[in-house]
Image (cartoon, rainbow, N blue to C red):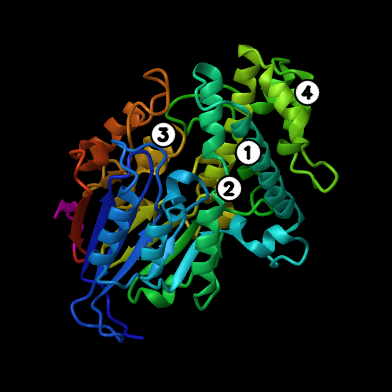
Amino acid sequence: MSSATPTGIGVRMYQVGFGDCFVLSFHYDAPLDDGRDVRHVLFDFGSTRWPKLHEGRYADIADDVSAHTAGALDAVVITHRHKDHLGGFGNKQAAAKIASLNPKAVVRPWTENPTAAAGATGPAFVGERSFRYVRSLEQAQKFAEVVASSIDQEERGFRGDLRDVAEEQLKNKSAIKRLDDMAAATANKGDYVFAGSPISFDKLLPGVTTTVLGPPTIDMWPQVAGEKADDPEYWLRQRGLLGRMLAAGDASPDTARVADTMVDAQPIDAQQIDPGPLRWIIERLHNQQTHSLLRIVGGLEDAMNNTSVILLFQVGKRTLLFPGDAQIENWSYCLTSPKAKPLRAALPDVDFYKVGHHGSRNASPRSLVAEWGGRAFKLSSMMSTLPDVHGDTEATAVPRQTLVDALKALGPLFRTDDLKPDDLFKEVSASTADTEPFAPV
């Protein structure tokens, strides 16, 4: 393999509405061993809300990725299982086009490792607590599936909100099957990464150092399994989650019993959810109870976000951060654990940031954003988002305005919602020889 170092970087951010789809490209000044002078990495491919209803856009984007990469994709990174990050692989035409680019690596979090989910024969890094956590996520998604199928599509208000949130937590079975097939075709049969783990990018991207900052496994960092009620890293302090809600008694005993099967992270072989009684419960929920169930399903959303892969790229004078939708419980390992000190060493030097969780209040650590201030060089940020999808007030809106203002103060912020409805993407580039802000192409 050539020892060349990239001389330029490009990032293409596709307009998928409320979702993520990025192509990160490393450009070399001479052809590498395979005759190509560029390497391409696709980050996520999904959406839950489009800027306008246009289901064909998945196929349009896949066609553009194919043209942009000249038919050769080096790696696919699916940061986590949510539809807004992998839904495009549920589209048969779009998925076939991406698969035809023959990615040499398919990277997903450790929780997606088929062996880890299968049982005690899992890889050595998955201990008993981590294994139980994976099983708990599986059970929680069964719970969400029953919730989603129990509420009519015409329902609005609290019940409609509950259905919508539950639908976003479903397993996306067709998308995952296609990703599994793509991973099986690679030399490693898929990269299932965790904080500090190796990654095949070391061989695929000459001259680029790639560090996996997250997620930690549960055995490494138990905190990742539960969202904090109040954390100074949030851009808005939050109310307590499931434990406090149940303790306060604002969920029915039946709802609490069903919730227990998903939050206790216990082995579930003898605790299968019976969809019949659960449907009966959901159909009879009053508004207060619906709020409680909405928070339960929302707890699954938080858990899945905290399985997000966080990757840091270093090349030349550039440091790029791609954190998926990682929330603070995922981040906390890298930011605070003594064992993770080597992982966070380069974080102060980040000069490109893919904004986490579409600008949500609990994904971009305050301390990290503050650390990027007062430097001699600016931070360039890219945010894929669609306003007015989540949050009923200014305080809960996504993107969070206080975060947006803070990022703008640090340097250029490029947003998909600044594009025209028919624009397919926004692209920026930079040299690896300096730290000047990334500029539009």
Q: CA distance from mark 3 to mark 4?
A: 32 Å
- Report if residue 78 lies within the magenta region: no
Does dot 3 land on a helix, a strand or a loop?
A: loop
**Disc 3 target residue:** 360
Q: Is residue 191 above or below residue 436?
A: below
Residue at the spot 38% in from the left edge and 43% down from the top edge: 19
Residue 27, given in percent of the width and then of the height, sits at 23, 71
Q: Residues within 10 Å of mark 3 (few under 14, many from 20)?
A: many
For the residue marked with disc 3, what is the amino acid?
A: Ser
Horizontal side of residue 215 vs 28, given as left or right:
right
Residue 171 got which mark? 2
* Front-most of residues 190 and 27: 190
The residue lying toward the viewer, choosing from 426 and 150, is: 150
What main secondary structure does the magenta stretch of the protein show?
loop
Q: Earlier in the sequence, mark 3 or mark 1?
A: 1
**Circle 1 crowding by C-alpha within 10 Å: few under 14, some 14–19, many from 20:** some
**Amino acid at pointer 4:** Asp
Q: Residue at x 32, y 55 (%)?
A: 59
Label 4, on which residue?
A: 254
Taking the view exactly as shown, the residue that stands out farthest to the right is 270
Report the span colored magenta. 434-441
Q: Determine the CA span between mark 3 and mark 2.
A: 22 Å
User: Badges 3 and 2: C-beta atoms under 8 Å apart?
Assistant: no
Position above or below: 106 against 15? below
Circle 4 crowding by C-alpha within 10 Å: few under 14, some 14–19, many from 20 = few
The location of residue 290, given as percent across then percent down, is 62, 19
